[in-house]
Image (cartoon, rainbow, N blue to C red):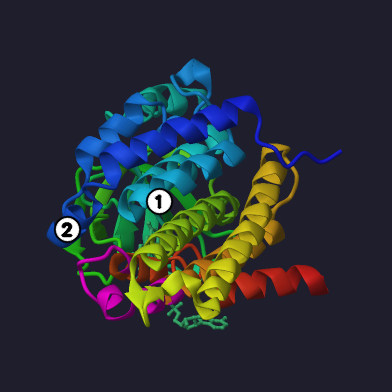
Amino acid sequence: MVSFTLQEDLQMLRDTAREFAEKELVPNAAAWDEERRFPREAVMKAAELGFLGMSIPEEYGGNRMGNLALCVLLEEINRGCASTGVTVSVHNSLFCSPLVKFGTEEQKRRYLPKMATGETLGAYCLSEAGAGSDAAGLSCAAVRDGGDWVLNGAKLWITTGSEADVFIIFARTGEHRTRGISAFLVEKAFEGFGVGKKEEKLGIRASPTTEILLQDCRVPGENLLGEEGQGFKIALDTLDGGRLGIAAQSLGIGRACLEASIRYAKERKQFGREIGQFQAIQWKLADMATNLEAARLLTWKAAARRDEGLPCTKESAMAKLAASRTCNAAAREAVQIHGGAGYTREFPVERYMRDARITEIYEGVTDIQRLVISRHLMA
Ligand SMILES: Cc1cc2nc3c(=O)[nH]c(=O)nc-3n(C[C@H](O)[C@H](O)[C@H](O)COP(=O)(O)OP(=O)(O)OC[C@H]3O[C@@H](n4cnc5c(N)ncnc54)[C@H](O)[C@@H]3O)c2cc1C
């Protein structure tokens, strides 16, 4: 039997996350966005609530509630602030999760306990200037030198780049397009590691996106993550989970759009009545709510599959595809329902619309999700 009701512990998690978002994020998100200020305090409070240890087993200080729980959590956080949302998402699903799955016991003991408490933050470095959708085209190189590896190259678009402490960096260790890629755990304190340009962005402006520069960056041999040549497999497996985080982010931004629209439709009067009494507005709200519900079911289904250890590449791509498009449609309608007011900074829907755009771009653009899905259909 399939149950569509969240278990009690997930309901509790959702309520705690909602309260956290209402208190810590909703009142501050606009200012953080305006000032491009990383919400460090909020992230630390999230850590106190256990939100940074969602992928980490208890023995390393986390609560390992899993992917479905992470999606429930991320929807609530992103409803309040998409910049905080992506920080928590990347930390859990793009850093901690692959470390738990592919790391050695020693690597897990060294890094995970501090990740669970927020003392250190994680980042994921796959993209480069010449390798975006075509991630296997990366050219950042790692060469053995005695027991160490020496990394050279530049990574682009790295979320939390200027704030993170440990980075999973994918680099070329062989000529084969995919089997010639390996993954490394690189600390910001390592010699030759640098943070480059910080991007000026349309949305999620409180989340720093930076270049990562590697100039003869010396990485100890024991910091190879997984086996040599296994990097691309790790990168793709990690993205199956990461895309669920972005689907959940889309749900959160989309729900914020819906809630703001309902509020405004009940307040704003034209032609002698609240605009919410016009059927045209009611239909928009009904479509937004229905599409969000459908995207949520896809997201939860894919997350549940990943928690059960079942393949979820197609399901995860479907969830991200549907949720990110739904989020963007909801943001467009929310601005429309607000009329001229929606086009100003007086109302949050302007920010939601800017934040929504990224959900169709990172962790694989919309057309790459369609490519992944269609490959599965025709295989
Ligand atoms: C704010 C932000 C944060 C990010 N965070 C991270 C991060 O933490 N770590 C990380 O590694 N990366 C990160 N990225 C990178 C992100 O994943 C890439 O931007 C994304 O994968 C797209 O790559 P690209 O920008 O090079 O676009 P391109 O690949 O150049 O795509 C440009 C256009 O071409 C189209 N296109 C490309 N290939 C195909 C194809 N085969 N079929 C059809 N259309 C195609 C795309 O749909 C798109 O419309 C981030 C990006 C941004 C903007």
For residue 343, say whether it is visible. yes
Q: Are marks 1 and 2 in contact (CB under 8 Å)?
A: no
Q: Assess whether residue 57 is covered by the magenta stretch.
A: no
Mark 2 burial class by Cα count in 10 Å: few <14, some 14-19, many 20+: some
The overriding secondary structure of the stretch rendered in magenta is helix
Quadrant into which the N terminus falls? top right
Q: Look at mark 2 in the image and give the residue it sits on.
A: 36
Whether label 1 lies within 8 Å of ligand 1 gets the answer: no
Q: Look at mark 1 in the image and give the residue it sits on.
A: 78
How many callouts does the rendering have?
2
Pick the residue in front: 350 or 372: 350
Rendering coords of residue 301 (x, y %): 70, 49
Query: Could you tell which of marks 1 and 2 lies nearer the N-terminus?
Result: 2
Give SS at disc 1: helix
Residue 237 placement, left or right of 166: right
Give SS at disc 2: loop
Residue at 33%, 41% (x, y): give it.
22
Real-space Cα distance between discs 1 and 2?
A: 17 Å
Rendering coords of residue 194 (x, y %): 19, 53
Rendering coords of residue 130 (x, y %): 39, 76
